[in-house]
Amino acid sequence: MSSSTGPSKPRVLVVGSSNTDLVVYCQRLPKPGETVLGGEFKMFGGGKGANQAVAAVRAGGDVTFLGAYGVDSFGDAAWERLTKEGIRVDYFQRVTDAPSGVALILVDGVTRDNLIAVSKSANESVDPAMISAARSAFAAADVVISQLEIKDEAVEAVAKICNEVGKRFILNPAPTRPLAKVLYEWVHVLVVNEHEARSLSGEEDIDAAMTWFEKQGCPAVVVTLGAAGAKFVSFADGKRGSIPATKVVPVDTTGAGDCFVGWLGVGIAEGLGLERAVQRAIKAASLKTTRSGAQDGMPYRSEVLGS
């Protein structure tokens, strides 16, 4: 990162995945067994971890990324993208036994809904040993962010170190799978979309799902609701609310959730209360949907907050 980075910038460590997104914009999404011709192809930087890192650095954070990539052109390009953004890549490691991550994405040309499949890759090389070796990066961070495109034991190692060194841990459990109870107890804020909230809790009602998270020991939850905005609750002080999304005409919703998480992390690292951090993150995520590409479409701080 450039020497212009000042000590006043909130320090964010993102631990997670890096992918290259291969995107086809279709007239409509194909049904199983069907081929839809005539789509436009584009290639973007992706992976939930790298996406959130880019969102956070554009939000004004001093960002470090911990992840893995393979010995291939996709990995080289991913390293270059993060470096150009000004993200610290000291812990973005090259591995020789797996290819770099790739995601295949179909985007509906009318509704802008998407379908995503992610390959097995170097992302699975992120392990507790790699995380333990980065302990100094945890110690230096104001906030640590992770997701579930890396192995369970890696996420649990992240949470454990955050707990040991007293760092605020934001977990975005996506793609969804059952979580160890200790993750709910060690997280500072759990960020889920409405589908993830229902899947994890078994509750159809979002408020009931949030109560379920509280019973697991989770101190705070944010549930994103797409075009409907988000709900949040801090169980420690009882503060809760619903915040509407900014009205926009969406172009590509890919990465909007990651944009939200990155901006939320920076807001919390800056000392904003949960409600204000959520408000700002929603504004940023709404703006992101008006642009193509997960990383390319992430808005800059000046665009969201004004110069």
Image: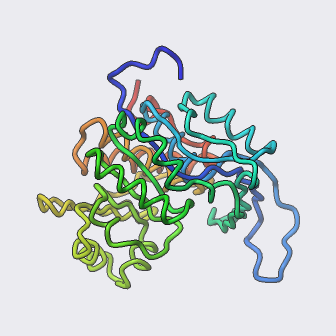
Tell me where residue 34 appears, x and y as whole percent.
Answer: 83, 80
Tell me where residue 136 appears, x and y as whole percent.
Answer: 40, 35
- The residue at the point 29 percent across, 63 percent down is 221
Counting the numbered discs, the total is 0
- The residue at the point 55 percent across, 51 percent down is 289
Compared to residue 226, the image places residue 60 above or below, namely: above
Q: Is residue 62 left or right of residue 10?
A: right
Tell me where residue 154 appears, x and y as whole percent.
Answer: 49, 58
- The residue at the point 53 percent across, 18 percent down is 2
Query: In which quadrant of the rendered image does the C terminus lie?
Result: top left
Tell me where residue 114 appears, x and y as whole percent.
Answer: 64, 65
Q: Residue furthest left?
A: 237
Q: Is residue 249 left or right of residue 30?
A: left
- The residue at the point 62 percent across, 66 percent down is 113
**Colour option used:** rainbow
- Res. 57 in view: yes
- Res. 109 in view: no
Compared to residue 201, the image places residue 175 above or below, namely: above
